[in-house]
Image: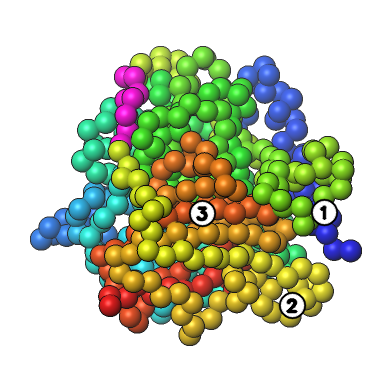
Amino acid sequence: MFTRRKFLKSTAISTLSLSAATLLPNMASFADNPQIHKNRLKIPPLNEGKIENNVRIFNLEMQNGITEFYQGIKTPTSGINGSYLAPTLKMINGEQVRLNVKNSIGETTTLHWHGFHLPAKYDGGPHQPIKNGEIWSPQFTIMQKAASFWYHPHLMGKTAEHVWHGLAGMIIVEDKESMALSLPNEYGVDDVPIVLQDRRFLSNGAITYTPTRHDIMMGMVGDVPLTNGTIEPYFVAKRQYLRLRILNGANASIYQLSFSDKRKFWQIATDGSMLEEPLETDEILLSPGERAQIVVDVSGNKNFMLQSKPYLASMMGGGGMMGSGMGGSMMGGSGNSDEYGVQFNFLEIIPAENLAKSPPLPKKLTKIDWLDSKEADKERKFLMSMKMGPAMMLGMGNTHTINGKSMDMKRIDEVIKLNSTEIWEISNDSMLPHPFHIHDVQFQILSRNGQKPSPSERGLKDTVLVHPGEKVRFIAKFKDYADDKYPYMYHCHILEHEDAGMMGQFLVVDS
Ligand code: C2O
Ligand code: CU
Ligand code: CU
């Protein structure tokens, strides 16, 4: 029998054996607190564009290049205005932006503004291909609350490969409210973008994207963690409070993040907004596509590590269909939970000797206009499924579906009336967790398995992780932009799953 547990086990073991050699000695020597990581964290350049006639204009070129992840080893990669990853773009709510995107990667791709509310024809999804050598120039108004977003290619069937090679960057949006808050905000000093990924390196240093069928099923997981494209990075913190804008930019890995010394921190933002108030916590779960901002007090004269660790998720809401036997779970979890996530050391943080004191955090960060489920005009249900076993192994197609359908660019799956408020219920009857992402809107989670969402999800979201057997309900309003020709996407943000068809399309129409 082809069970989920067997899959997870084989993947976990291969991941462990690959990383054990580098991780375990690190952990052992960490108690004495010598510096472990040797590479200074790369900070993507900040690009604020330039304003012409009240439009903030960015010039972006998607290109191929060579990156030295390991000293002296040349890895062919792709990037935007550079060889790997992309500049951090900064925009302000309410202003007009134009992004001149030149494609020089030698093949067709797209560039999508993940998390943005914008006209469908400027979304940069599968329907806005940019041929090699061409320039695409979407222009739109920023209509977001302050948060961190990101941008990446979204060509049908090619998203995973293009992102894996390095095409992705962060976008910081500020608004009047956020600019008035006393939060760490000096880019690269106490306000730092943290793009988390993992990659597999071949012996010649290449990160060629060659997923096996198993990788397509599980998602492509690497054994080398990268932070802003840096291997084994450290960062010297000069001020007491360090704000990290974290993006899970991995193709498939789920990161359960915490600090090696278990120190507490505050979560201050979700995908698409600040939290209403800082949330004190000691861990945060980010699946591919999700973002969070945290503030950590680095005082204590000791280095510490931002790490991800495997975690147990129990199958709530009667997820017994997986038939977990007693004690069957790896790592000795209870019979009804399974282990996900990977073990990585992402970033060593070194507090400077003369740490500058930071002002206290504000008590209130924002006010969210909560939508009332009683005002919903419509409810829709989405079921994420995977055909496992022979169908998958033989590559029989249609293995990754939403509501039984595999993505078809010529098929519109849902039609939504402009200005309507909808509740979407997302469930997952497969053996793997899937991060569900929707374009155009920021949603509010109403419930997870009938329970209130955790405080860490009480902000605006565009991506939500749905574990096997779970049911997540969210509410969103579809406003401002209608188009009866160009659709928006919704999909699993495990990029291998998206490319394999776990995606659908919706129109927002005015009538
Ligand atoms: Cu981050 Cu449809 O994408
Ligand atoms: Cu998106
Ligand atoms: Cu998925």
Q: Is residue 441 magenta?
A: no
Circle nearer the viewer, 3 or 2: 3
Q: In the drawing, what numbered circle is on residue 376? A: none
Magenta segment boundaries in residue numbering: 359-366
Q: Secondary structure at mark 2?
A: loop
Mark closer to the chain start, 1 or 3: 1
Q: Secondary structure at mark 1?
A: loop
Q: Quadrant of the C terminus?
A: bottom left
Q: In the drawing, what numbered circle is on residue 323? A: 1
Q: Amino acid at mark 2?
A: Gly
Alpha carbon distance from label 1 to label 2: 26 Å
Q: In the drawing, what numbered circle is on residue 395? A: 2
Residue linked to disc 3? 473
Q: Which is more toward the observer, 88 or 409? A: 409
Position of residue 304 relative to residue 398, above or below, is above
**Residue 92 in sight from this viewpoint:** yes
Q: Amino acid at mark 1?
A: Gly
* Image coordinates for residue 368, horizontal then vertical, percent: 32, 42
Q: Main secondary structure of the magenta part?
A: loop
* Image coordinates for residue 65, horizontal then vertical, percent: 49, 62
Label tally = 3
* Image coordinates for residue 344, horizontal then vertical, percent: 65, 40
The answer to whether marks 3 and 2 mark residues whose Cβ atoms lie closer than 8 Å is: no
Left or right of 109, for residue 182: left
Circle nearer the viewer, 1 or 2: 1
Q: Quick one: label 1, few (<14), some, or many (20+) residues within 10 Å? A: few
Q: Amino acid at mark 3?
A: Arg
